Every structure is written in structure tokens, then in C-alpha cells.
Amino acid sequence: SSWPAGHLPPQAPAGVHEARYGGGKATSAAVAATLLCCTCGRRRSASWKNNKNNHNNNNNNNNNNFANALQRKASVRRARRRASEQTGAELTEGPMLPGSDHLSMAPALLQGETKAQRARRMLLEAFSSEPWPAATQVPETTSQELCAAGMQKLRQGEAADAKQLFAQAVLADADNPEALFGVGLYYELAHEPHVALQWMDAAIESQPNHVMAWVLRSKYLENRGELEDALRGYEQALRLKPRHAMALSRRNSLLAHQRVYIEPVGSWEQGVAEAIGAAGGAEDWQLPEWQENFLQPLESPFALKQPLLSGGVMAWDNVLSQELLAELDTAADHYCQFTFTNGWVSSGSGASSTVWLPAGSPPVTAPEVAARSILQRILRDEEEAFAGVEYWGRVRSVNLGADLHYDQAEDALDLRNEWVHGNPWRPQWSSVLYLTDEGGPTVILDQVHCEEGRHMPFVPQRGHLCMPKRNRLVMFRADLFHGSLPVKIWLDTPQTRQVFIFNFWRRHRPEEPHCQRPDYRHHLGMRGLELSPQRAAELAAPTPEAPQVLQPQTLRRPEDMPHSSDLGYLQVALPMPSMAQLQKSSGFFELDWAAAAADWLHEEASSTAKQC
């Protein structure tokens, strides 16, 4: 009952975490014993898979509890009030989607209008500047056959023909949910999700158990910051089809991202200093040098051309020209949507999550110009020194974090597999380019996946936090565990955190289908992003101002870190600065947990000695 507004009490995993939230104080021996036990398991490669499976099972249980708690908060009245605020209309008892408490976003029926007549009215708007499909006569081909033909055209990249066929299917049978879904899917691929949402809801009104329509509408709500309604939509899809892959993936991803946040409570009293000290002193473990593949180590590491990166993490402001930034503003949302829409267009190898720019290929879009500029201006290296650059865009709510992870090559058979043909490949450098000032920080830990374990050291000793600022770049060793933190959790907001991520690979090229070089001619929403060679050269022209180095502010005292976070996976919560601290300063911090823990233990020892 005393939990701050906008936050939910976290689920209490077993062990030290349970003692912490239960109000008890975990002893240093209990903390160290629990963590060392986990570490022993991780040191044996045969145990890593078992640990991962157990962790996933616990996450699924937590996801179910978390989702149920949120569903109990759901209110039809609030949904209607939000719709009223967005449209400026008076609050009315509007139509709800069948079998749910979700407000339908399909156009309201006019007086005396049927749903079939509304569908034709929606088509009139869709084709207001295009030739009307098949005039006004009902085609001889059935609506289902037209839908199948439209899907085939869509997969072949012939979007205009697909739209005509889907429209003809609606004219043939305006109650056919697949025809309504098909038109919506066209707008999904055109990266006009606000229009797609209307057609998805029309399809759901016609067929309430249309699972894919529920998933796509929920994805749109998630992207525009309506996180709770998005979660309830994914849950609705899973009630209709419990093992639906996309619904399950989107739901679990949303919940995983929400487990990473800063709590307004401290952790020094909970034995975290002892845990940090135990991890730092275990076998005198030291952070190893970066390796592209620790099972196939290089005898001679690559020469570092940028000395500021010798510590593994650094940030710069004013990295790119304003003209290039403006182009990236236009591209960011399209690249974010492309991650989820390109799978509908068959290229023979499957859906792509990231895009590949190989060395020697001319840049054809604004982010590719930016990638080459960062390589030359920040890394101070030549493009031939790298196999290429992997990149993608992210636009998400400022109140949605990113679950901590390693950047790695992904196996073609299992996109969530930690191993690629038995070998974990890593890019050398990862980087985040911020396009907005809004959002929470990128968090980078000194943990790596190596032969000793999945996360070593088993409790981080140091970390970095970098707050978003337009035209800021943070770059770090790509083998470091990292993610991002939200400003708040489970609060709806239209504010978004917009970034591009660039990974620089030395020798290895990440596998398809996860990383591809797409032909944008086949992707409706991406066609307008390709640059002419002349325009690309103009954007690549060097600017007179050099990027400004942003030195980190080091926090090394316990009082500098009054709040805490378990980052969604630790069994103890690491001390953290408050979000207010992060927002009031330069925005780039080094957190020296080892030094702060030593100070805390020294003060405790001195206090105990005085009492004796």
C-alpha cells in the first residue's frame, strides 16, 4: 500500500531477493553463499542450459502473476476516457470489441449504417487518390480467393496489387474478416499503423477470435505507449490461442522489459556490499580482453585506434551534422516498424531483425551514412578494418526499458539461442545514438560471458549509465552486458525514446535471417528512405565541429547511490542513483560499486569496533 504511484511491487524471487522485499535483512553470509552457489553452477558449461531453463520457468511464473495484477487494474471507463481525450469528443458509452473490455478503434457506425456499408466507406477513404478497385461490380472470384491472391502479392513485394485484391475481397464480402485484415495488413506494411488499427478492429468485430488482428493492434498500442492495454491485448490473443508464437513472444518481451527499473529504496542495508566484495575477490577475477569469440581467441588483438575507448566505455556529444540528424529522425520509426513488418514479405530466408552494411558497399540510407561517419570520426578507423556494421532503430515509450542482454550473432535455427554453431560470436563495439532527450539511461555493466560463466563477475563491480540527449553517442565493448532503464513503469505516455544502434563487427558476419541486407524495393514502408548517391555524399560530408568528449561523473560513495535495481536478473539489488539525479546532471556516469562497497564495509567495521 505504500508503494509509490506508478510503480507495482516487484515479484519476490526466492533467496536473497525474497528476504529483501519481505522486510527481513539478508546476512552477508547468506548473500555470498547464494551467489557463490549460482556461480559454481555457471562455471560448468553443462549446467548453463539447466540454469537458463530454470530462469525461464521462473520468468514465466512471474509474467503470469504480473499480467494478472495488471488485468485487475483494467478499467473500461478509463479506456473510454483516454479515447475521449485523444479525439476531443464527449465521453460516451462507445462500442467495445466483442468479448473484451477494449474500445473499438474502427470508425463509428453512422445512423442506420451496417458494418458492411461502413467497410465500403472505409474503402472510399483508402482509395480517395487511387483508382477504385474493380469499379463497383462484385467480382466473380470469391472473397477468400481474392484474399489468398492478395497475400501472395504482398509476399512478393507487389503492395499496390495486393491492396487492390484485398479491397476487391471486401467488396465481394464486407463481413469477411480476412479481407478486412488484409487491408489492415497493407497499411501495417506501409508503416501507417494508425490506419491499420481501424481495419484490425473491424476484422475483430467480424471475427472476435482473430488472433493475429489482436496481436497487431496490441503491438501498435505498445508502440504508442499504452502499455497496459497492449499487455491485455496480448493476453486476449493468448486466451484464444495459448501457444501463439508471436503473441507469446510480444507478451513475454513486454514483461521482461518492465522488470528492469530503478526502485526508490536503498539496498546497502540488505548485504549488497558483502555480495559485491565476494564477487570482486573470487579467484582474483579480472575482466578479460575483448575477443570476437572466446572459444576461438585471437593471439594478436586488433589495434585500438581510439584511445578514449581503452576503458571499454565512452560517450560523445554533437556527433553528427544537423542535416543528417533530420534524415535519421524520419528513418527511426520506419526502421523500428521494419523489424516487425518485413517478415510478411518473403525474401526466401525469413524475417530480419537487424540490417547489415558490409564493408565496401556504398551507404544507401541515412543510418548507413551515420554508421560510416561514426566509424571514421569516433573509432578513427577505416571501413575495410571491419567486416561490416549491423544496425537497427528503436522507438519505444520512455516508460519501457530494455531487458539486459549481450549483443551477439544469432543462430538461424533459433533466434534466442545463446550459442551459434557452438560458438558465441560478438561484435567488437556496440553503440547507441540518441535522437531525443527523453527516456531513461542505457546501462552497461562490467559483466561478460566467458569460459568461467554466463555473467562474470557474478555481481557487477562497475557500471556506466548514459542518459539520452539528442546527437549523443555512447560506445562500449560489445561483449558487456547492457540494456536500458525506464523513467517510470506501467504509466502510459506518448513520449518516446528514439535511438539507432550500431554494432561494428571485425571478422564475423552475423547470420541470416536475423541480420540481412534487404532489398527495400520489396518493402512498402521503406522505399522512400533510399538515398541517391549524390544525397548520400552530401550527408557524409565532414562537419567543421569535432564531436565533444563527455567524461563520466564517477559515483563511488554509498550516499551517491540511495536507490537500487536488481536489473531484472540479479539476486541482490545494486545501489543506484535516483532518476532525479540522473536527469539533473550531464547524464554520463560511472558507478564504482566496488569502491562504494569497500567504504560501506569500512564504516560498518569502524562502528562495530567502537561499540565493542
Image: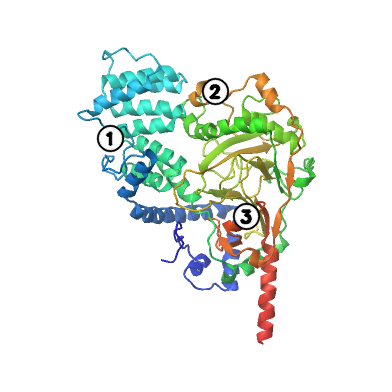
Q: Marks 2/3: CA distance? A: 39 Å
User: On the rendered structure, is 380 left or right of 7?
Assistant: right
> Is residue 211 at least partly visible in the picture?
yes
Mark 3 lies on a secondary structure that is helix
Residue 98 position within the rendered picture, expressed as x and y whole percent measured from the top left: 26, 40
Residue sitting at 45 percent across and 61 percent down?
Answer: 9
Image quadrant holding the C terminus, namely bottom right
Residue sitting at 70 percent across and 40 percent down?
Answer: 318
Q: Residues within 10 Å of mark 3 (few under 14, many from 20)?
A: few
Q: Label 1 amino acid?
A: Glu
The residue wearing badge 3 is 584
Residue 528 marker: 2
Picture quarter containing residue 73? Answer: bottom left
Sequence order check, earlier mark of 2 and 3: 2
Q: Label 3 amino acid?
A: Lys
Q: Nearer the viewer, residue 244 or 123?
A: 123
Sequence order check, earlier mark of 1 and 3: 1
The residue wearing badge 1 is 205
Residue 404 position within the rendered picture, expressed as x and y whole percent measured from the top left: 57, 50
